[in-house]
Amino acid sequence: MADPKMTPHTQTVLRALLGRDTSGERRNTVLATGLYGLELSNMTGLPNGTLFPLLERLRQAGWVTRYWEEDDIAEAEGRPRRRFFRLTDRGAEQAPLALAAATATTLSTGRTAGRPGLAGGAT
């Protein structure tokens, strides 16, 4: 299992799964219970077509696990079950290190890990 590439989107999702809110404060309940898809999308601003493939790559790397909410909870609230995503022990250990390394690289080079421009320049 290779470690995931630390793109800006990956970093954003990992920060959310680590339980960091917009002020940088930790919310330990996130590490324990995880976040469901819509909640993650709202927190990160990422559309589903970006978010869910990224979560799948993190799952394949062994950093994220996913699970369905209990039927009773969803039925009591009159809605479909939610799929939750939570960092694994490995992900909770490696994510802060990877984020720190990505931040250090960005600071030392002054460049972000954004998408490269078009080959051959603009027309």
Image (cartoon, rainbow, N blue to C red):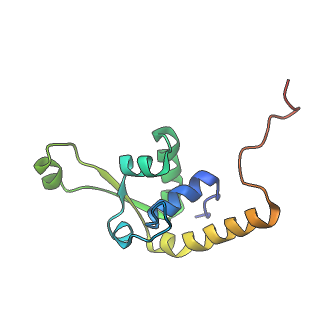
Residue situated in front as seen by the camera: 59 or 6: 6
In the drawing, does residue 26 fall left or right of residue 12?
Answer: left
Q: For residue 10, what is the image quadrant?
A: bottom right
Q: Which residue corresponds to the image point at 19% horizontal and 56% vertical from the top-left?
A: 70
Image location (x, y in percent) of residue 1: 58, 64
Q: Which residue corresponds to the image point at 72% horizontal and 69% vertical from the top-left?
A: 104
Image location (x, y in percent) of residue 120: 88, 32
Q: For residue 11, what is the image quadrant?
A: bottom right
Image location (x, y in percent) of residue 14: 52, 61
Image location (x, y in percent) of residue 6: 64, 59
Q: Which residue corresponds to the image point at 49% horizontal and 50% vertical from the top-left?
A: 44
As drawn, 94 above or below 17: below
Quarter in which the C terminus is drawn: top right
Residue situated in front as seen by the camera: 76 or 27: 27
As drawn, 47 above or below 89: above
In the displayed orientation, state which residue is furthest to the top: 123
**Total numbered circles:** 0
In the displayed orientation, state which residue is furthest to the front: 23
In the displayed orientation, state which residue is furthest to the right: 120
Residue situated in front as seen by the camera: 20 or 89: 20
Q: Which residue corresponds to the image point at 14% horizontal and 43% vertical from the top-left?
A: 78
